Amino acid sequence: MAANGVSSGLIVSFGEMLIDFVPTVSGVSLAEAPGFLKAPGGAPANVPIAVTRLGGKSAFVGKLGDDEFGHMLPGILKQNGVQADGINFHKGARTALAFLTLRADGKREFMFYRNPSADMLLTPDELNLEVIKSAKVFHYGSINLIVEPCRSAHLKAMEVAKEARALLSYDPNLRLPLWPSAEEARKQIKSIWDKADVIKVSDVELEFLTGSDKIDDESAMSLWHPNLKLLLVTLGDKGCNYYTKNFHGGVEAFHVKTVDTTGAGDSFVGALLTKIVDDQSILEDEARLKEVLRFACACGAITTTKKGAIPALPTESEALTLLKGGA
């Protein structure tokens, strides 16, 4: 920790940043939506903003289109204190777009415009290796594994970060509509599984990856690998379960008035990484880890109380207020 209590280690997040288009009216299908509002999105971009909101240091590495949206997005990162030196621009391909809605039946519906989008065209030799080498924590998802050349860029970035002794953090963030098949998604998500030090999956992703409909310890531990330091299973409004080599348990959720769950998982991950970046011994101390996970659950809960991911990401004082039993 820096002297002022703010984390000083750099958390670098790798992957896609895009524009989400969200209907102006909730509870409708995409086809029925009368209009859409644009919102910056992409889980790997939400995480570093979650980090800086909480007083941490972060950077984003990825590729955007050389278009209006592509130039708007780094501006949003910079406004939020995220280093954007790791961003490349592609002259021919557009910034990715996603249309998403929460239907009346509670199901989220996604429609992606990537044909191919700029983030898919990031090549290994375009990576800003200086940024990646300076990471204390290197965080990523699985969407970059879908096609080349960004798959090779992803693998190289992980390798460089690992050589620089960064902690590798993996949140698969399953988006099935983007994959050619469920089998391919499962295979590729698992292909980099044993490289990660910290893995966070949702209850839905746990079911998908294990092929079991049981959300229990046995199911979770089937995903364990020998180099893993922490496995987390988030359970929505039921909190999260944690697993390490020496102990496991659960942390309860905070009950809030949920408006939109977008970004809650990214907020949770950003909070966790901010708290452990300068002191990884927390991962071996159950009492301290539980405290950090309660803080992360509070951050996730607050994010569900407002529309959109980035506007809803909390500050430390907001999270502490919730932890103390405030609103």
Image (tube, rainbow, N blue to C red):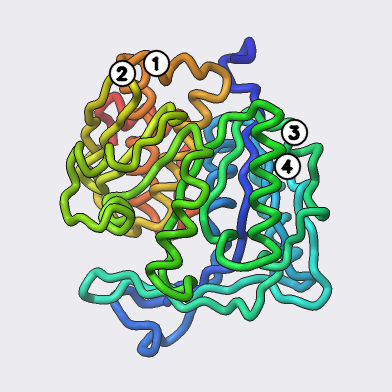
Q: Secondary structure at mark 2?
A: loop
Mark 1 and mark 3 lie on one chain; the one further toward the N terminus is: 3
Q: Residues within 10 Å of mark 2 (few under 14, many from 20)?
A: few
Which amino acid lies under the numbered mark 4 shown in the image of this protein?
Gln
Give the image quarter of residue 19.
bottom right
Marks 1 and 4, how far apart at CA: 30 Å
Task: Determine which residue is flagged by label 1.
Answer: 284
Q: Toward the viewer: 159 or 53?
A: 159
Residue type at tag 3: Lys
**Label 4 crowd (10 A; few <14 / some 14-19 / many >=20):** many
Looking at marks 2 and 1 on the same chain, the residue that comes earlier in the sequence is marked by 2
- Depth-wise, is mark 1 or mark 4 nearer the camera? 1
Residue 179 in picture, x, y percent from top left: 47, 71
Q: Which mark is residue 246?
A: 2
Disc 2 from disc 4: Cα separation: 36 Å
Determine which of the numbered discs, if any, sits on residue 133 in the image: 3
Q: Would you say the residues marked 2 and 4 are in contact, meaning their CB atoms lie under 8 Å apart?
A: no
Residue drawn where x is 73% and y is 61% of the image: 122
Instruction: Answer left or right for 36 relative to 122.
Output: left
Q: Are marks 2 and 1 in contact (CB under 8 Å)?
A: yes
Labels 3, 2: front one: 2
Residue 121, x across and y down, in percent: 72, 67
